[in-house]
Image (cartoon, rainbow, N blue to C red):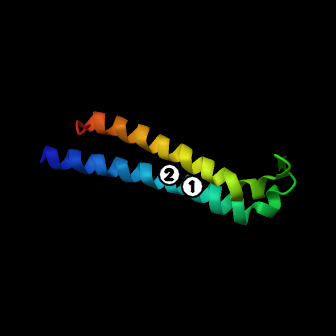
């Protein structure tokens, strides 16, 4: 029974990490790049407005950071639950 509960805890933590990552990615790519672009148009970065920057480059950089953060968090979670490679 304890093995099943530990497995459930591992997958619950994994799904929580994935859910948080997807929310951050959605906010940065769709939210800042499309929905909030008119509100961000007054802020200039690199010669263009912040909304355009998020749509073209910022969401990609955030995605790359999320990939490395996810790998780091999953390695830590694997060690905590004894399933590391």
- Using residue 63 as the reference point, say whether residue 53 is left or right of it: right
Residue at horizontal 12 percent and vertical 48 percent from the top = 1
Return the residue found at the far left.
1
- Residue 11 against residue 81 in the figure, above or below: below
Secondary structure at numbered mark 2: helix
Where is residue 82, by image quadrant? top left
- Residue 30 against residue 79 in the figure, above or below: below
Return the residue found at the far bottom.
35
- Using residue 50 as the reference point, say whether residue 14 is left or right of it: left
Q: Tell me where residue 28 appears, x and y as whole percent.
A: 64, 55
The reply to whether callout 1 and callout 2 are in contact (CB within 8 Å) is: yes
Residue at horizontal 37 percent and vertical 42 percent from the top = 74
Q: Tell me where residue 81 appears, x and y as whole percent.
A: 25, 38
Q: Tell me where residue 13 appears, x and y as whole percent.
A: 36, 47
**Residue 66 numbered mark, or none:** none
Q: Quadrant of the C terminus?
A: top left
Q: Can you identify the residue that label 1 sits on?
A: 25
Residue at horizontal 48 percent and vertical 41 percent from the top = 68
Secondary structure at numbered mark 1: helix
* Residue situated in front as seen by the camera: 34 or 58: 58
**Residue 21 numbered mark, or none:** 2
Q: Tell me where residue 45 appears, x and y as whole percent.
A: 81, 46
Tell me how far mark 1 sits from mark 2, CA to CA.
Answer: 6 Å
Residue at horizontal 17 percent and vertical 50 percent from the top = 4
- Using residue 75 as the reference point, say whether residue 64 is left or right of it: right
**Tally of marks:** 2
Callout 1 environment at 10 Å: few (<14), some (14 to 19), or many (20+)?
A: some
Callout 2 environment at 10 Å: few (<14), some (14 to 19), or many (20+)?
A: some
């Amino acid at each position: 029974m304890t093995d099943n509960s530990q497995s459930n805890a591992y997958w619950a933590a994994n799904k929580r990490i994935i859910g948080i990552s997807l929310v951050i990615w959605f906010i940065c790519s769709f939210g800042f790049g499309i929905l909030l672009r008119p509100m961000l148009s007054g802020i200039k970065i690199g010669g263009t407005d912040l909304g355009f920057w998020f749509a073209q480059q910022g969401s990609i950089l955030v995605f790359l950071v999320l990939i490395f953060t996810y790998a780091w968090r999953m390695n830590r979670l694997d060690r905590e639950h004894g399933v590391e490679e």
